[in-house]
Image (cartoon, rainbow, N blue to C red):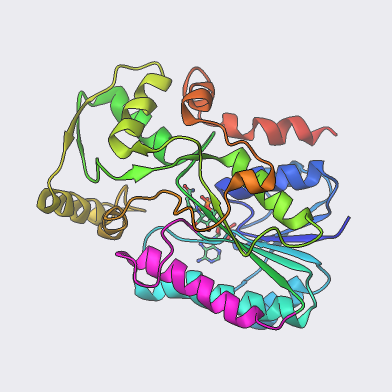
Amino acid sequence: MEPVLVLGGTGFVGRHLCEKLVRAGYPVTVATRAGTQTSPLRCLPRLNLVQADIHDAPVLGDLVAGHRLVVNLVAVLHGDQARFDAVHVTLPGQLARACHASAVRRLVHVSALGAETAGPSMYQRSKGRGEQVLREALAGSATDGCIVRPSVIFGAQDRLLNLFARLQAWLPVLPLAGAGCRFQPVWVEDVAEAIVRCLSAPTPPAPVIEAAGPDVMTLRELVTLAATASGKPAAHILPLPDTLARWQARLMELAPGEPLMSRDNLASMAVDNIASGQFPGLAALGITPASVAAVAPGYLGQRGPRSGLDGLRRGAGR
Ligand SMILES: NC(=O)c1ccc[n+]([C@@H]2O[C@H](COP(=O)([O-])OP(=O)(O)OC[C@H]3O[C@@H](n4cnc5c(N)ncnc54)[C@H](OP(=O)(O)O)[C@@H]3O)[C@@H](O)[C@H]2O)c1
């Protein structure tokens, strides 16, 4: 099996992807900024976890060398223009150039639905520019580029449904920004499987794949589903008008740590996050995506918040 390098492999999608790659027999290298000793990925056999500064071009070049397949999952949800540019634009460009220099066979870059250079948020514009930079760097290269654009991703340890399930456990009324924005939630296992299939196909399946689930749901509907799937009564949802929503996001930005929602997140919800239909979807990869209503009760219900690691724990003894 060809060796795979995964950048951002310690994250939500990465943990599911790494488990699938290891089960399929791929030797996997994961680069992380964090210490490697306590990572749950350490329990996976044939997975080499290395601490590295992937923003340093020579370091990145050394990491890429020796791999035939590369996946980029690195992203940030919050920050200023410089942070979005460094992670979503500069890094994919450097990575594509490193892949070309090392004759990597395929680079799978995970972007997002709504990645547009003229999008309403810094997140979407930087994702759009990152795709552009990556395509330019791979033009005429022996490395195939494959871009996967997911809608919001659900699954054990997701951010969105777990957060709203927790909030509704103690809030009877929930003021909600972007309540009418429509999403096409996609299961993390389906996204991970799509990446594996993009890597393993003898020829690139498509330059861009839209990874979206079977249901189109408003944020309001998703929030209600988070409560019912976790066995709690749904809160009364109070959709916030734009001005109040911006004030709420501004206040959340002032709280310590990563904000629950920033003004940039709010700006992203000015447009629906659903498949455009201009590019192939998961069906083109032979995947029938699971619905959030079928999957969410399994991890929001009785099981603990760390149940997402169960798969990794089960694999540890093999
Ligand atoms: N989750 C969703 O709902 C969703 C929806 C649409 C698209 N996506 C896309 O799917 C991909 C994977 O998302 P995810 O939810 O798995 O993300 P995640 O959980 O936040 O993981 C991203 C990983 O990137 C690495 N990283 C973050 N900031 C970095 C930085 N400044 N420099 C270097 N590495 C950094 C981190 O690894 P270390 O800390 O180990 O270095 C982290 O584990 C991303 O491209 C994201 O935009 C996700």
86 versus 233 height, above or below: below
Q: Quadrant of residue 148?
A: bottom right
Any part of residue 209 in sight: yes
Query: Residue at position x 40%, y 40% from top?
Result: 160
Say if the magenta span includes residue 134: yes
Q: Position of residue 22 (x, y in %)?
A: 79, 45
Residue farthest front in this picture = 278
Q: Answer left or right for 309 relative to 187.
A: right
Q: Position of residue 176 (x, y in %)?
A: 22, 39
Report the number of discs.
Answer: 0
Is 238 drawn above or below residue 208 in the view shown? above
User: Which residue sits furthest right?
Assistant: 1
Tell me the quarter of the picture where residue 44 sits. top right
Residue at horizontal 12 percent and vertical 46 percent from the top: 241
Residue 251 lies in the magenta stretch: no
Image x and y of residue 108, in percent? 66, 62
- Please state if 12 lies on the left or on the right of 268 as rendered: right
Find residue 143 and report its horizontal and vertical position in percent: 74, 74
Locate the C terminus by quadrant: top right
Q: Which residues are magenta?
A: 112-141
Which sits in the foreground, 30 or 278?
278
